[in-house]
Amino acid sequence: MIPSDTAHTADPAFSALAAEDLSLGYGDRTIVHGLSMAVPPGVVTSIVGANGCGKSTLLRGLARLLPPRGGRVLLNGTDIRTLPTRDVARTVGLLPQSPVAPDGITVADLVGRGRYPHQGWFRRWTSGDDEAVQEALEATGTLELAERSVDELSGGQRQRVWIAMTLAQRTDLLLLDEPTTFLDIAHQVEVLDLLLELNRTQGTTVVMVLHDLTLASRYSDHLVAMLDGSVYASGRPRDVVTEDLVRDVFGLSAQVFPDPVTGTPSLSPLVRNPAHLPS
């Protein structure tokens, strides 16, 4: 399943999630500087850029985990800081970078925690919660791990379990910080196929930080390229990913060409001295 050519226009008036003149940082350091962007609703958006450019910081700000130093984040047109926490959790699901599970917790219990925003004050478990957890485990290929301790899992298995917990939350909008971390190439493609299918079949808006520009181009309708805490370029991957962008954003000389399978942008880094390559 490949993204279509008809991504929504990134207009704040038609987006469920947007940033207006947003500044974010830690301590005495500002990472994101006066950034404005809108997340196109109902499509897959990837945020790309070099290490340290502010991708994860921006995602934390969009998820209300990091208070703005300036500007604001809008969720359905309302400043996200003014909304009740439970309402935000029912709308926005977040997979942070390097999440930590409680010691000894089983896979099923961890995935079940994704249901907390949908339960009442007394946290009564329902058949609907069972169904959501079951579907999330099946979708991520982790059903056979349900009774195992998360501590016993490999890095790749653990990452899929965290994604299952996020899916069990059943939100309209998913924010994922490097969801393919620790996964081999086969499982990277499997996870990205899953997220794209979720978008196409259920209309879930997906925003993810990815390091692989070729995979981001293949699986995204909309691409946001960041440089030094600001948006360098945004739009359809085939309009955004150029050799100039790769050089300016990543400091890399590369040839950009249409993927022979999908037609989406793919890149091949240029080697300083080809004669040194293995024959």
Image (spheres, grey):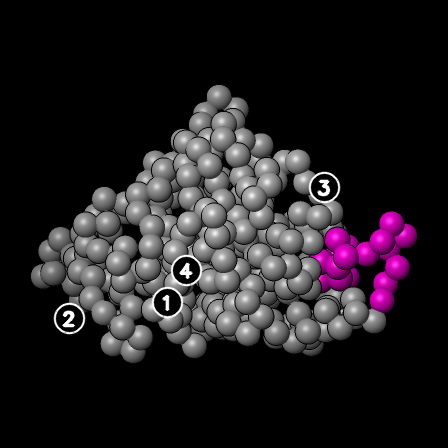
Magenta stretch contains residue 118: yes
Which label is found at residue 8?
Answer: 4
The residue range painted magenta reads 109-126
Reply above or below: 192 against 20.
below
Assess disc 1: are there few (<14), some (14-19) or many (≥20) residues with their C-alpha within 10 Å of its C-alpha: few
Q: Is residue 68 left or right of residue 234?
A: right
- Residue underneath mark 3: 84
Whether 67 is among the magenta residues is no
Q: Position of residue 87 (x, y in %)?
A: 71, 48
Up the image or down, 158 lies above or below 74; here it is: below
| First along the sequence among labels 4 and 2 | 4
Quarter of the image that includes the C terminus: bottom left
State which tag comes first along the sequence, 2 or 1.
1
In this view, 266 is above or below 86: below
At 22% from the left and 55% from the top, the residue drawn is 242
Badge 4 vs badge 1, beta-carbon distance below 8 Å: no
Give the number of the disc on residue 6: 1
Q: What residue is shown with label 2?
A: 279
Mark 3 or mark 1: whose residue is earlier in sequence: 1
Q: Amino acid at mark 2?
A: Ser
Q: Are marks 4 and 2 in contact (CB under 8 Å)?
A: no
Residue appearing at x 58%, y 57% in the figure: 173
Q: Residue at x 71, y 58 (%)?
A: 114
Q: Residue at x 25, y 76 (%)?
A: 260
